[in-house]
Image (tube, helix red, strand yellow):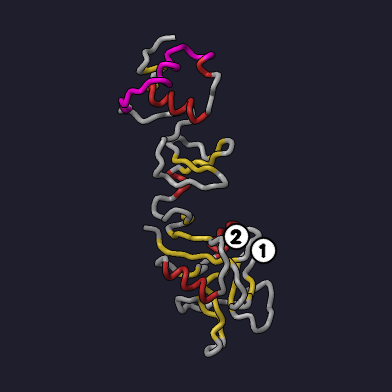
Amino acid sequence: MGGSPKEVWGLTWHTLRRCLLVAKADNVPQIFPPVLEESLNSTSTERSTTVPWISSTTFEDNSNYPTTENSRTVRSTSPATSEGNYRYITPENRGTGCPIRWDLYKGRCYFFSTNEENWNNSHVRCSNEGATLAIINNTEEQKFLQERAGLEVYFIGLRYQHSQKRWKWIDGSGFQVNFTNYVPHFDCATVGLSPTMDKSSCEISHRWICEKKAS
């Protein structure tokens, strides 16, 4: 089968030992040659000078990369984006100009919260991140946000200004009303659940979308 106690199939004993211990494969030494048993029982402190690669769909063993509890996330150098119970983060689908958990779209970063707050608190949350509640500038951006929101409801940076008797974005720009619902005295706007925007009470708690320029 070839190989020495230090290297088998081009992999170092340290790499194989890690793989076997993680898998808890008690029967593996019966399948592979005794050299693996020697590797498992070795007390050598020698460290590998190569990056430990595993399987044909390679991903780096680096504990500094982000992970998620529900779908284990690893950094990938292959073009694959998902396999089994893993979701791979690649430079192409992650967006290097946005923080972790932010989505990149046409030079802008968007954060979709999982917590809920009223509109004012949502605005503060975005400000703390150096961002604003999302401002929709065109139909393409609105479609992106609607599709990303899915069946959830998110506050955006649009509010009715009673002093001016008109809807305005938080950057001061105006807005041509195009709501699905026209409930009176609802002075804030949301996206999600409908093909357009909805009016909402500003005091009701919803999720929120923050937006800022990609770095």
Residue 96's place in the image compared with 206, above or below, is above
Q: On the image, which quarter does residue 140 sit in?
A: bottom right
Alpha carbons under labels 1 and 2: distance apart? 8 Å
The x, y position of residue 181, in whole percent, is: 69, 74
Residue 195's place in the image compared with 64, above or below, is below
Q: On the image, which quarter does residue 199 sit in?
A: bottom right
Callout 2: SS: helix
Mark 1 Cα shell of 10 Å, populated few (<14), some (14-19), many (≥20): some
Q: Residue at point 41% right, 20% down? A: 41
Q: Give the label on residue 102, or none.
A: none
Quadrant location of the N terminus in the rendered image: top left
The x, y position of residue 180, in whole percent, is: 68, 71
The x, y position of residue 7, in whole percent, is: 37, 18
Between 163 and 71, the residue placed more toward the observer is 71
Q: Which residue is mark 2?
A: 149
Between 194 and 174, the residue placed more toward the observer is 194
Q: Residue furthest bottom?
A: 163
Q: On the image, which quarter does residue 127 sit in?
A: bottom left
Q: Look at label 1 and name its amino acid.
A: Leu
31 magenta-colored: yes
Contact between marks 1 and 2 (CB within 8 A): the answer is yes
Q: Give the label on residue 193, or none.
A: 1
The x, y position of residue 33, in whole percent, is: 47, 12
The number of numbered discs placed on residues in the rendered structure image is 2
Quadrant location of the C terminus in the rendered image: bottom left
Q: Residue at point 40% right, 50% down? A: 96
Question: Reading the chain from its start, which is encountered first: label 1 or label 2?
Answer: 2
Tell me: 148 left or right of 45.
right
Q: Residue at point 54% right, 66% down? A: 208
Q: Which residues are magenta?
A: 30-47
64 magenta-colored: no
